[in-house]
Amino acid sequence: MNEKCASCASCGFPLHEPSDFASGDPLSIYCAGCVDSEGRLKSYEEVLAMNARWLEENQGLDASAARRMAVALMAELPAWKGRAQA
Ligand SMILES: [Zn+2]
């Protein structure tokens, strides 16, 4: 399970502290930001919007560039890998 540094299977966010994990559960493969209050994975669109907003704020990208980058990032992540590209 710990063959590599844990990161969220949905958004790629690094998971270090228990509080980083969904529901504070270190066995979860998702981060706290990617699940709803019941611990279920949010929709692709919700996670995409969250990711794009993070990139805008932290990488200084404009909205459309941030969204394109988020789409590309999420295409590589286990939670969304099989999903057809929009
Ligand atoms: Zn996440």
Image (cartoon, helix red, strand yellow):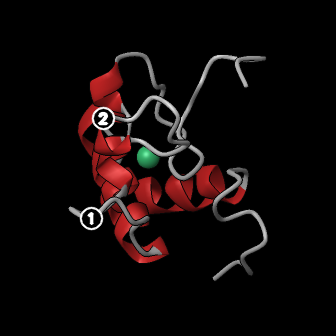
Q: Is residue 82 left or right of residue 43?
A: right
Can the viewer see residue 32?
yes
**Circle 1 residue:** 38
The answer to which of 70 and 36 lies nearer the viewer is 36
Residue 41 x, y percent position in the rendering: 43, 64
Q: Is residue 64 visible?
A: no
At 55% across and 42% down in the image, what residue appears? 29
Badge 1 crowding class, 10 Å Cα cut-off, few under 14, some 14 to 19, many 20 or more, is: few
- Marks counted in the figure total 2
Q: Alpha-carbon distance for marks 2 and 1? A: 12 Å
Quarter placement of the C terminus: bottom right
Q: Does residue 10 appear to the left or right of 36 in the view shown?
A: right
Residue 43 place in picture, x, y as percent: 43, 75
**Residue ID at (48%, 46%):** 30
Relative vertical location of residue 31 with respect to residue 69 in this rendering, above or below: above
Give amino acid for label 1: Glu
User: Percent x, y for residue 20?
Assistant: 33, 29
Hey, what amino acid is under mark 2? Answer: Gly
Image point 70% across, 18% down: which residue? 2
67 over 43 or under it: above or below: above
From what the image shows, is residue 14 above or below residue 8?
A: above
Upstream in the sequence, badge 2 or badge 1?
A: 2
* Quadrant in the rendering for residue 59: top left
Indicate the secondary structure of the residue bearing disc 1: loop
In-image side of 20 versus 10 (left or right): left
Which residue is identified by label 2?
24
